[in-house]
Amino acid sequence: MATAAAAPFSARPVRNFLFPRTVRMKCRFIFNPRSGHNARNPYLLDEARRFIRTQGLDASVEVTERSRHATELARRAVDEGCAMVVAIGGDGTMNEVAAALVDSSAILGLIPCGSGNGLGRHLGIQRGGAESFATLLNGRVRRIDTGTANGIPFFNVMGIGFDADLSARFNQLHRRGFRSYVTTTLQSLRAYRPKRYRIRSRDLAIEESAFLIAVANSDQYGNNCFIAPRARVDDGRLDLTLIRPVRVRDALPLAVRLFAGSVDRSARALCHSATDFTIDCSEAGYFHTDGEVHETAGSLRVEVKPASLAVQVPAAA
């Protein structure tokens, strides 16, 4: 049940700039009931419906039923003329919805309510509540880049190595959140063995063992864990962070740097910015895109598509 703080719109109408009554811009909300906080307390579904009603929007809410369903619903929304499609979920839901909007005129709206909310945090969009709904009305459109890994889009971070192994474990959790993330990370640390990679870009060619390799569009995984502190979503580039094999005594200092936003100054890290990367590994394995895990035979082509997605962000962001 929604609390008084979670239901601001019936008591405090928001000035409507994006959806003026004379224009009646069509909008679609896509709600993932299994995402982060939605799985424990789905009040945002009622909030979205209340928001539509109190603001007099030409909009509707769709609920996802399976993996990748949000992409199907978002594509249908674009085909039906929706000018904005709003993802209510975590980074996985964001990825599924955004994938359908790349290179289209439709705007992505975000009501972040996952366990990490990396892209939302980077863009200054508050976790689900009054501020994130208000951004849909009073914000501004910002065009951001899209990354692709073997043709699969990502908007926050993709990774290979421990990064992907952790994502696979995290996706199997029945209960998520910061504590679960830390516990799962520690368990994975004990089990994971680094691999050797060859990385190439226009001005980089290295071969090195790595604990993980992340290629980031935004600066963080989520939860203010900054894997690429200098990354920006609209600079036309991607930021690669390679973490060298981590010993037990390295783990805590590295974690401190990740949360302090200074991993790029660690002796355990190699950082590089480019428009594309080729990452080769002698072993087949997994990689992830915004937490979604995929198989790879051992070679990844990672590229940027500049200014390919429109996102509604806070006016002051």
Image (cartoon, rainbow, N blue to C red):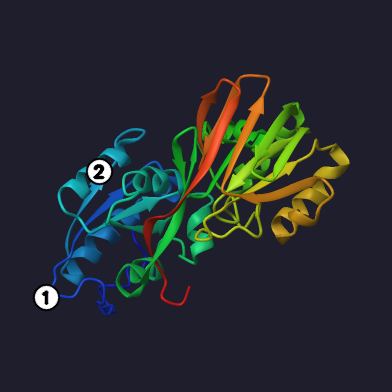
Give the residue number, with chain letter if any, for mark 1: 22
Can you tell which quarter of the image residue 181 is in? Answer: top right
Give the residue number, with chain letter if any, for mark 2: 75
User: Earlier along the polypeptide chain: callout 1 or callout 2?
Assistant: 1
Q: Position of residue 165 (x, y in %)?
A: 62, 31
Can you tell which quarter of the image residue 276 is in? Answer: top right
Is disc 1 surrounded by few (<14), some (14 to 19) or many (20+) residues within 10 Å? Answer: few
User: Which element is circle 1 on?
Assistant: loop
Is disc 2 surrounded by few (<14), some (14 to 19) or many (20+) residues within 10 Å? Answer: some
Q: Position of residue 293 (x, y in %)?
A: 51, 31
Who's the residue at 52% across and 24% down the image? 295
Q: In the picture provided, is 69 more to the left or to the right than 230?
A: left
Who's the residue at 52% across and 50% down the image? 156
Q: In the picture provided, is 186 more to the left or to the right than 87?
A: right
Q: In the picture provided, is 76 more to the left or to the right than 150?
A: left
Q: CA distance from mark 1 to mark 2?
A: 26 Å
Q: Position of residue 46 (x, y in %)?
A: 27, 57
Considering only vertical position in the picture, is 312 above or below 267? below
Who's the residue at 58% across and 31% down the image? 169
Residue type for callout 2: Arg
Q: Position of residue 252 (x, y in %)?
A: 81, 48
Contact between labelled residues 2 and 1, with CB atoms less than 8 Å apart: no
Who's the residue at 75% across and 55% down the image? 264
User: Which element is circle 2 on?
Assistant: helix
Q: In the picture provided, is 189 more to the left or to the right than 138?
A: right
Label disc, if present, on residue 48 of the rendered structure: none
Q: Nearer the viewer, residue 215 or 132?
A: 215
Can you tell which quarter of the image residue 11 is in? Answer: bottom left
Q: Nearer the viewer, residue 217 or 31?
A: 217
Q: Which residue of the protein is positioned furthest toward the left in this rendering? A: 22
Q: Report the quarter where the N terminus lies.
A: bottom left
Q: Which residue of the protein is positioned furthest toward the front in this rendering? A: 202
